[in-house]
Amino acid sequence: MRVVLARRRGAERGGPPEVHAYWRPDDDTSTAAWWAPCGAKITPENAELVPRFAGAPCDRCWLLVALGSDAAPVGRDEFARAVPEPAAAPEPVAAPDPAPGAEWAASWSIRATHAVEPGAPRSTLYGRPVVLARCGELGWGPMAPPPGWPLCDGCVPITGART
């Protein structure tokens, strides 16, 4: 026997399609009804198999499946321990002063500056210029480095820049 997630075909017409965890025979050609731990019953021809976490889960099925899990229980003392202090973040490396002929690209998602080769591939994205940085990341530009933004961690060893 194995467990599958399924809902009744056409259930969306009568409300949210409730997903149950059914025990299914190993024999795929079997026409025997499938039973869920909550007591729901379905025949294979009326079942629509669903991927994980799709539809509206049956609360009783999820609870009973979780209680029958093979996962090791976690004791209360494991939660009572003090959380270790996170390691200190490394100091950001400042972007070097723009040298003549040097090009830079900004990465707004990580608020860092990337070093760009003068002949690096360029394109447009959302109507704005983008360029491939020396570290392999895509950045907006080329442009002057934004003041106060650090050099990205991937560009530091490539450019040899220091603080």
Image (cartoon, rainbow, N blue to C red):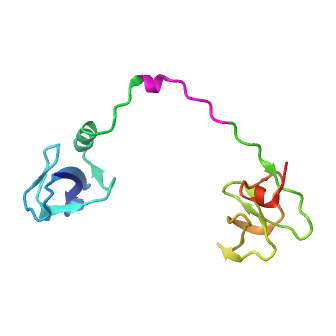
Q: Is residue 157 magenta?
A: no
* Foreground residue among 74 and 7: 74
Which span is picked out in magenta?
77-87
The percent position of residue 122, horizontal first and vertical second, equals 72, 76
The residue drawn where x is 72% and y is 54% is 153
* Foreground residue among 20 and 90: 90
* Residue projecting furthest to the left: 32
Q: Is residue 83 magenta?
A: yes
Q: Main secondary structure of the magenta part?
A: loop
Check the image and report above or below for 4 versus 117.
above
Q: How many numbered circles are shown?
A: 0
The residue drawn where x is 21% and y is 57% is 7
The percent position of residue 75, horizontal first and vertical second, equals 38, 26
The percent position of residue 22, horizontal first and vertical second, equals 18, 51
The residue drawn where x is 77% and y is 43% is 91
| Residue 83 in the figure: left or right of residue 5 | right
| Residue 53 in the figure: left or right of residue 18 | right
User: Would residue 65 be visible to someone looking at this image?
Assistant: yes
Q: Quadrant of residue 154?
A: bottom right
Check the image and report above or below for 24 versus 141.
above
